Image (spheres, grey):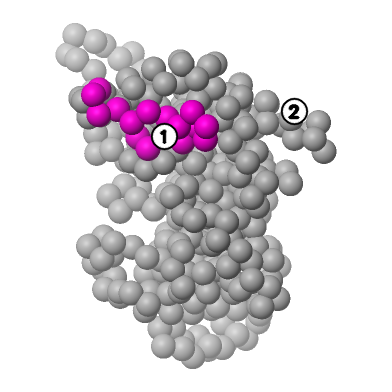
Amino acid sequence: MRPEFHLTLPAEDGTGAFPVLPGFVTDVRPGTAGPYERLARVGRAAELAGMGGVLAPFDPAGQDSLIVAGALLRDSRHIRVAAEFHAGIATPVYAAKLSASLQRFSGDRLDWRLAVDLDPRVARSQGDFLEGAERYSRAEEFLTVAKGVWHEEDYGFAGRFYEVLGGGLLFPLSGRPFPRVQLSGTSTEALALSARHADLHVFDLADNLDAVIGELRALAGQAGRDLEYGLRLPVLAREDDGEARRDALRSWTLRSGAPETFPEPDPRTRLWHGFGGPGLVGSYESVAAAIRGYLDRGVSAFFLEVEPHLEETYRLGEHLLPLLAKEIHNAG
């Protein structure tokens, strides 16, 4: 199985794209570093590093993911760009038209990451008051309608959340491939929705991976479909395990100020629970071995999370990804 590697882009931090310089420093490049420039640099780094794509995450307080995706698609030639958004962002008809336009302009490199199970406080702040299972019912209709108007002329639909009469994309927007749909979650509703609509289901390291992949594979088989499986993967990789541990400790101390509470990386799995959740910390070889283990368990797409984004993306492109490519080529 040939893996895909995607980079998760940074969200806005509320302080602007770059730190404010002290008064005695003169920047001779006025206007060259706008709010998008940091994201553009990280996107270019991901493409130069040989990654297959980037994810523009749903960011309630920051820039809109579809706008970011459009800009990144324009600035790149090969990588896919996934925009994460929730169904309350717009009607599925408008989302389809917007996405068909992006497909046309980018050579069909747009993916969708549908965020369904939002924190209720975040959802309400976005004007979205649905909760619980209703969110999955609406997502089902959203994807059904979006695909319907994408692929059919004179499309009609009457559901609980949406109604369309005589819809459908016409030339020049018609005939393009629908964005690859990414979904996530491990609830009964989440797995049922993915079985019917997802192309790629993305898990967290904390999930019971083997059991949930098995369950989702069975559900998709009943629906006559075959999915791919992805993994959200925070990573800190260095020349050796000792250097990786030292940098993990430095990161932990900067964030918490408590080195005595530092959780040691597991020497067997290289899992480290200091990212705000589990991730991989170790040498390039040990992190590559851990990733190969997930490949053997059915995962084919990895959404890498690194910090700082620009420097670490180049580091992975120089050391980790070539190592994996070489080993997978030799194994194949």
Which residue is rendered at x = 49% and y = 41% of the image? 233
Mark yes or no: residue 266 visible: yes
Report which residue position mark 1 lands on.
Answer: 272
Mark count: 2
State the mark number for residue 199.
none
Q: Dot 1 surroundings within 10 Å: few (below 14), some, or many (20 or more)?
A: many
Report the span colored magenta: 259-275
Q: Is mark 2 on a helix, strand or loop?
A: helix
Q: Is residue 97 above or below residue 294?
A: below
Tell me which corner region of the image, top left, top right, bottom left or bottom right, holds residue 74.
Answer: top right
Magenta region includes residue 253: no
Mark 2 vs 1, N-terminal side = 1
Mark yes or no: residue 314 visible: no
Q: Residue furthest top?
A: 24
Q: Nearer the viewer, residue 84 or 22?
A: 84
Q: Give the amino acid type for the residue marked by disc 1 in the picture.
A: Trp
For marks 2 and 1, give the CA distance: 26 Å
Which residue is rendered at x = 72% and y = 43% of the image? 2
Residue 72, horizontal then vertical, whole percent: 52, 42
Q: Residue furthest front?
A: 268
Report which residue position mark 2 lands on.
Answer: 326
Q: Do the residues labelled 2 and 1 touch (CB within 8 Å)?
A: no
Q: Give the amino acid type for the residue marked by disc 2 in the picture.
A: Lys
Which residue is rendered at x = 33% and y = 31% of the image? 263
